[in-house]
Amino acid sequence: MNKVRFYTSLILARLLYMSIKLLGKSSGTSFAGMMTLKFCPDFLSYCRSYITSSAVTVTGTNGKTTTSGLLAHILETDNNSVIHNVKGANMLTGVANVFALNLAPFKKFNYAVIESDEAYLTKLYDYFCPDFLVVTNLFRDQLDRYGELSTTASFIQNGIDKVSGMLLVLNADDPLVANFGKNREAFYYGFEEVEFCSDVHNTDSNAPTEVFNCVCGKPLKYGKRFFAQQGHYACEECDFKRPEPDYKGYVKIYSDYSDLKIVEKLSGKSFDFRINLVGLYNAYNALAAISCAMTMGIEYSVIKEAVASYHSIFGRTEKRIINGHETLIQLIKNPTGASEVLKTVDLSSNIVIAINDNYADGRDISWLWDSDFEQLKDARKLVITSGIRAKDMAVRLKYAGIPQDRIIVQEDIKSAIEQASESEDKNEKITILPSYTALLKISKMKFKKG
């Protein structure tokens, strides 16, 4: 009977998806999945059998969408069929949505690459057991939804404890993430050296840095610190320290790309990559995806080709032409992620910051005050604040040192972007920094390309 429900739910999901697309009522990333789970609550437990090789899950505070997107692109470049929640809908309904709309009774996929919200990981593993879990990082994010970092870490740990045979791919530079590998089979990635080679981007940050304690309660000491708690750390009181990475990264960060060298611990061989994404945070995402692909046995030539041809989507360093202007869209959602993005902003561009406080963004916007918007104090063009909390954002920019006569409040997001792109000088660039639901709105907007 349940199998019949499963097959029926595949038909119903497609009919529902076609209906909502025709009506233009939704982006279609979760609603069909929500209804599928209502009709067939154990729907996801049937999905694993449609993956003939490996299933990979990716979680963490920042970088999930880019890391999973790049890994899926690598596997597809290797001529594999891959099912992947490419649009970043990563709660249980979003995961069910992508399976419901892509599976068919006699259609199987070589791989699954599933991005999962940290809080939903343990629920996902009640139904779907992967072969790999990649964890990117753990930062403070939406305190009204997740609480303190220890709570978020416990969500992930509970998920890990449910799947005994799963191989972990962990960020060695993040002590909270590295700790997941205790008593588990794990591969680690991390940076040995980071060199900034751009005269456009800043390397320093005024964002507050938290003091992280070891599991024994003593403060960790850092030999190198790249940003937030990520770096080379050790405890002077016990034996807890940064594990030696299986994939050691050496990166040079330029204004709009990075050159990455990875040294594999086991073989001692080095591999070179060109990453066409902005900033150190994206270099971490690339290192995570490449490390997982190498662990899965994908050939270097395939990975190199895929990394060179990958372009981020959906506001994760997304490049678009809007009204003839080159535009860069970068999601911001928490202090650490926003501060790293703000380091990379072209201060000669017109800047739009669109902040909402819907449920998916987090109702608590105190993170704006912990983010390093002081990076924008030397902005040379317009700085337009938009979205539901446009006025709050304008106040934050005033305290960041931006002259009030340069700050424009335009709550309607499309009008704000139109204003930023109204110059006839097509050499003027635009930077858009939206929160999550503001990004969803922007993704549906139509603009002239020329």
Image: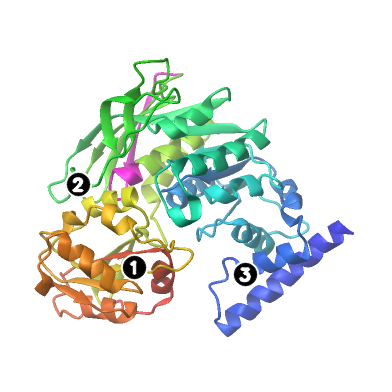
Residue 78 belongs to the span the image colors magenta: no
**Which residue sits at x=78%, y=58%?**
105
How would you rate the neighbour count of disc 2 (Cα within 10 Å): few for under 14, some for 14-19, many for 20 or more? few
How would you rate the neighbour count of disc 3 (Cα within 10 Å): few for under 14, some for 14-19, many for 20 or more? some
Judging by the rendered image, the residue that carries numbered circle 3 is: 31
Q: Depth-wise, is mark 3 or mark 2 nearer the camera?
A: 2
Tag 1: residue type? Ile
From this viewpoint, is residue 14 visible?
A: yes
Which is more N-terminal, label 2 or label 3? Answer: 3
How would you rate the neighbour count of disc 1 (Cα within 10 Å): few for under 14, some for 14-19, many for 20 or more? many
Q: Quadrant of residue 231?
A: top left
Q: Position of residue 125 (x, y in %)?
A: 66, 44
* Alpha carbon separation for disc pair 3 and 2: 40 Å
Q: Quadrant of residue 55?
A: top right
Badge 3 vs badge 2, beta-carbon distance below 8 Å: no
Judging by the rendered image, the residue that carries numbered circle 1 is: 355
Magenta extent: 267-283
Tag 2: residue type? Asn
Judging by the rendered image, the residue that carries numbered circle 2 is: 206
Judge by depth and name the residue closer to the eye, 334 or 420: 334
Q: Depth-wise, is mark 3 or mark 1 nearer the camera?
A: 1
Q: Position of residue 449 (x, y in %)?
A: 30, 76
**Which residue sits at x=72%, y=48%?**
127
